[in-house]
Structures are given as C-alpha cells and as structure tokens.
Image (spheres, rainbow, N blue to C red):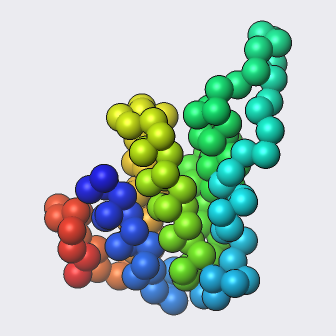
Amino acid sequence: MEKLRYLRRLLQHLSPNTGLPLTAAKDSIYTAKSFSPQTLNVIPGTGKQETVKDAFVRRIRETMGMQDTEPVFRERGPGLIRVVIALETLLKLFPNDVDVDNIIDALLETAKRHYLDANDPVSFTCCLCVH
C-alpha cells in the first residue's frame, strides 16, 4: 500500500511541464467504469473463461494502454487518481498479487519518467514525500 500512496502523490502533483492536459474529474477519460470489467473473456486457445482478477487486470491494462508497452497517461488531474482507487480495490480483493504489483511498479516508473522529462524534482528514495 505504500507504493500506492506514493503513486497517488506523484499523480496528484504532475505539473503542466509534462505536456499532459489538465482535465476536470467530470471530463476525465478515467472513470470507475473504465477500470471495471463488464464481462469475463474467453482465454484464446483454452476455451476457458478468465478469472475475475484477470478481468480486472485486463481492464486496467487496457485503460492504461499497457498492451505490450509501458503505461500511458493521457491526462493529469483528479480523474487520473481513479487508477489508484481501482488498484486499491483490486489489492483488497486479491492481496499480494504479483500481476497487480507489476502494474503498480510500471505506473510508478511512468509517473517518475514524466517528472524527469518535465525537469520537475521528484524523490526516488522516500515513498511518502515528493519534493
């Protein structure tokens, strides 16, 4: 959960220097629905239905553009924080899950990269403070 607190803090303080548009929560592309699976897909080649956890992971990956690539933030602002809320919920349902942890790590790296690319200071050592 410490990583999620750090991710929340990083996302809350993304600056205009990132080039990401500041979007009001009501206009955000990141909604609770965008992180929730509507159906369970059939896994190609197996004919088996994916698990609920896998469906949530799939939706987060789809929403964050993580199909075989690093996550993509399309905006900054309060709507982007919804990804943290989705991950918090997922961790409550499936604690200590490796897939969820990998998503968190990837999102953290992308957020840090935005800070570096924008020449904004960021702490890489303290998970509770961003300078």
Q: Closer to the camera, 86 or 77?
A: 86
Left or right for 66, reference 43: left
Residue drawn where x is 43% and y is 79% of the image: 12
Which residue shows up at 72% across the image and 71% down it?
Answer: 29
Left or right: where does residue 38 sit relative to residue 84? right
Q: Is residue 100 above or below residue 122?
A: above
Given residues 127 and 117, the one toward you in this image is 127
Which residue is farthest front? 93
Q: Is residue 20 visible to us here?
A: no
Q: Toward which corner of the image does residue 78 lie, by quadrant? A: bottom right
Q: Position of residue 99 (x, y in %)?
A: 48, 34
Q: What is the quadrant of the C terminus in the image?
A: bottom left
Residue at left offset 72%, top offset 60%: 33
Furthest toward the left, the residue is 125
Residue 128 locus on image (x, y percent): 21, 68
In the image, farthest residue toward the top: 46
Give how far across and how far down residue 54 sits, in percent. 62, 32
Determine whether 122 is above or below 96 in the image: below
